[in-house]
Image: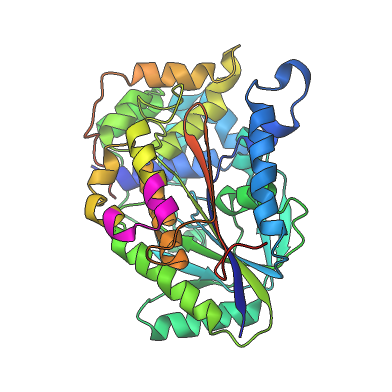
Amino acid sequence: MAEVVAVIASTHHPFYLRASTATGDARPPFADEWVAKVETFRATLTRVNPDLLVMVGSDHFHQLWLDNMPQFLVGKAPFYDANWYNEEREFGLPRMRFTGNLDLSSHLLRQGLDAGFDLAFSNELRIDHSITCPIITLRPQADLPIVPIYTNIFAPPLPQPARFVELGRTIRRLVESWPSDLRVAIIGTGHLSLELGGPRQFGPHGPDPEFDRKAVEWIAKGDIEGCLAEVTLDSLHTPGNATHGFMDFMLMMGVAGDHVAADYVDTLDLFHTMEAYFTWYPKGAVS
Amino acid sequence: MSRYLLDKFLFTVDRDPELVERYRDDPVGTVAWWEENVAGRLLGCPPVEGSTWQELTAEEREALATHDYPALFRLGAHPFLTLTLFIAMFERDYDEPLGFQLAYATTLAHFSPPYPDITT
């Protein structure tokens, strides 16, 4: 069976590429520290020599639209083109292309449907920065096949937080039951407190540092129970109007497992939002 | 009330570089053209299969035609769509990095949670 060699959860900050490659006066003062942290984080993936990446993210009204909005969707395509004109325009993200893995896509869909998740699928999916940002930070050579999984954290009505956790648990189980000898890393990105298009956006730090502190603790400890006791669809409005993206972190807590502490935790307090990086090694810390 | 249609305007304009410029330069004309030609289009289907019932309210039309992003926020337009499109149109008018984004936040400062519902 396939082996899950790493579970990784991260924020996806679309300005990283531009900040990390800027030079001279254009280079922001926080760029060097950010690059150093990302490179250390990247090593947590590199060291496990993955063959394939399952990538959990969320479309930002690029391909998925309100006339036909899936809650959870699995890509089932031989290739995935990536990044969109408005991401090129605003963030300077390059056009990219990835190879897929139809066998794992089929397995996740069939077994996921049979496990009680009525997953949507797409045979032609152009992915966006929720998936390309972690590729850029964690695997910049972009040389591994991917299977993308999209969640709706964006267009209400949304699934409940517990459903995200349960889907994460299911994804972990399904990858581990996939008849394959490949080494799989499961990577998902979300947000801590975040405001977009509202009065609290682009402040000197994230809109709700207290929420961020608690969120990092829940994730680092694998405290799913504590997290679910406090986080509801309604409560997520309070830390910032785009904080429902935290539910993708909750999904990744489900992948990592109840009360499984992360083997690697790091954060960076940036303007606008806090960056947060977590890695679990399912078979224990890699020596 | 047609939050969906407000979002559809922002979505269809934001993804088309020509429309972004046209909306910046001529908001009134662009909104009128859009209502006539795009509002009822079923995206991903041939034009003949369009919807027959899509219509902006007068208030929504006015908000779009005057680039009034605080009004769009109040009306429940999706904040991500509004922000992305308005950055594309107006970031260039500010000298400082994030100048427009910060002005945008200040302009919305009279809103406090709970914000207007964005459910479509």
Where residue A12 sits: x, y (%)? 55, 45
Q: Residue at x 68, y 50 (%)?
A: A42
Where residue B65 sits: x, y (%)? 39, 26
**Residue that sits furthest to the top in the current view:** B95
Range covered by the magenta-colored residues = A217-226
- B2 vs A64, left or right, is left
Q: Is residue B1 above or below residue B105?
A: below
Q: Nearer the viewer, residue A227 or A132?
A: A227
Q: How is the image coloured?
A: rainbow
Q: Residue at x 57, y 15 (%)?
A: B93
Q: Quadrant of residue B50?
A: bottom left
A90 within the magenta span: no
Q: What is the number of callouts on the image? A: 0
Can residue B118 be seen here?
A: no
**Residue that sits furthest to the front in the current view:** A287
Q: Nearer the viewer, residue A77 or A28?
A: A28
- A264 vs A255, left or right, is right
- B59 vs A184, left or right, is left
Q: Nearer the viewer, residue B75 or A263?
A: A263
* Quarter of the figure that contains the C terminus of chain A: bottom right
A224 within the magenta span: yes
Where residue B104 sits: x, y (%)? 42, 21
Q: Nearer the viewer, residue A246 or A7?
A: A7
Q: Is residue A228 above or below residue B23?
A: below
Q: Residue at x 67, y 45 (%)?
A: A40
Q: Residue at x 31, y 57 (%)?
A: A158
Q: Is residue A216 above or below residue B88?
A: below
Q: Quadrant of residue A167?
A: bottom left
* Quarter of the figure that contains the N terminus of chain A: bottom right
Can residue A264 be seen here?
A: yes
| Predominant SS along the magenta part | helix
